[in-house]
Amino acid sequence: MSFIIIWINMRRYLLFFACIITIGELYAQQITVSGGGRPAYNHTPEISTGLTGGVFVIYSLNNATIEFSGEDDSPISWRLFRKNGAASSTPISGAIQNGNISTLNISEADCGYIIEQNGESYYLWIIDYSQSPLILNAVSTSNEEGQCDMTTLMLDGEGKKLNYYSINGAPKSLRRELTVSYMSLTWDKESLAYTQTFQTETVYDFSSSIQVPSPLCNTDFTVTGDQILNYWGLSQTASTEEYITSAIGATATAEQTYREDATNEDDRHPTDYLGGSAPAEIEFKAYVTDAVTHIEWEFSDKEDFSNTIARYNDETLWYTFRDEGVTYVRLVASNSTATCQAYSETFTINIGEPRLEAPNIFSPGTSPGVNDEWKVAYKSIVSFKCWIFNKWGVQMFYFDSPDQGWDGKYRGKYVDPGVYYYVIEAKGANNKKMKLKGHINILRPKN
């Protein structure tokens, strides 16, 4: 068993060593493109193109060369191919070989080159930037209305595609990558405000008109590029005049006021939704961007707002929900021409079914804090009246809020133990009246 393990480990070591040797051989060959007045821009294309040597962009043909460092001093030959692929290549003469290094003066660009040595072929493509330069004369904004989501920029200039071809003749292009920069507004949850932020967008190819996300504030747009000129430190830049935005943004918040002391109220403080027990008071606040001139709170009993039951225009709206069921609320904002609209998130307010129950026994004055107050248990009660009488019909107590209760006293003193009677008239969130009558047993020793 030990012999087998040693043999397997030795075999892995030999395979690993062989891989190192192979990788070293691959990286021994090196292609360097220089001259042209600027350092060549090197782009690594997709493997499927077969351009194992890469794609190079030169500033011009002036003194431009390709240098190939081979694995040894065996002969190195050169061939040229065009967009129809490497199969139609033609031989090139004029390369100078010194040892393992062969140098070719580039007399033609926007074509491919094949370098061959020891039966191996290396493919690359050369682009002459001077034949397809980026020129940015000016940039302006389109004045068409309704640019709510995207804004159109008009570019005065030119920038033909930087094309290259695979060894099989498949057309490809090197992205120019123009950068558009401007200011906009973004929502900050921490400060509950829209804040101005710097935005950038990348446009892959030159076009007489390009689109970027519409800014939420007035700004100017600056276009710079392209990535090749950036590499050479020669970026072109053009800016618009101030753009008056028509795009808008709207955000809303909803905060419910809870009855913390109403310990006998069921679902008075829901944690994962709005509403619960009625009446539920909720404060809605609107936060909008610069171009908003009109806001409206929409209330609906349909989630798609196909039926609007109420509308309000307050920036801060306090609303008390008293009716059982689900209500949907959202903020709608628009600009001065009503061409752009923005919607906040939809708030779902769920008011639960009314419930009212009265206990029939308590023991005031015996164990403080333990069953020493008579209170109803309730939910979604929007109006309430309760009377308590003794057996002779004398009113002992009256209260008109279900979160209140009777402490078992009459005129400041505890009443005698025995049977008392209550009458309750209430109305629930379903708009139905409720009447309860019953008796209360007071258990406590006589004074």
Image (cartoon, rainbow, N blue to C red):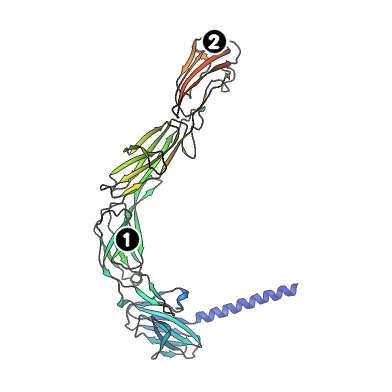
Disc 1 marks which amino acid?
Answer: Gln
443 horizontally vs 7: left or right = left
Horizontal and vertical percent position of residue 266: 51, 30
424 vs 308: above or below: above
Quadrant position of residue 15? bottom right
Q: Amino acid at mark 2?
A: Lys
How packed mark 2 is, by other alpha carbons closer than 10 Å (few <14, some 14-19, many 20 or more), is few
Say whether disc 2 or disc 1 marks the residue closer to the N-terminus.
1
Query: In this view of the protein, which residue sits in the foreground, 304 or 421?
Result: 304
Residue visible at 56% across and 80% down in the picture: 22
Whether pointer 2 and pointer 1 mark residues with C-beta atoms closer than 8 Å, the reply is no
Above or below for 70 versus 386: below
Residue 89, horizontal then vertical, whole percent: 41, 86
Rendering coords of residue 288 (x, y %): 33, 45
Q: Of all residues shown, which one is farthest toward the front? A: 306
Label 1 Cα crowd, 10 Å radius (few <14 / some 14-19 / many 20+)? some
Residue 145 x, y percent position in the rendering:
26, 54
- Circle number at residue 211: 1
Can residue 10 be seen here? The reply is yes
Q: Is residue 197 left or right of residue 408?
A: left
Looking at the image, the residue that sits furthest to the right is: 1
Residue 40 visible? no
Label disc, if present, on residue 391 of the rendered structure: 2
From this view, report whether residue 8 is shown above or below residue 331. Answer: below
Mark 1 secondary-structure assignment: strand
Measure the C-alpha gap from mark 2 to mark 1.
Answer: 83 Å
74 lies above or below 124: below
- Quick one: quadrant of the N terminus? bottom right
- Taking the spot 31% from the left edge, 42% from the top edge, the residue there is 295
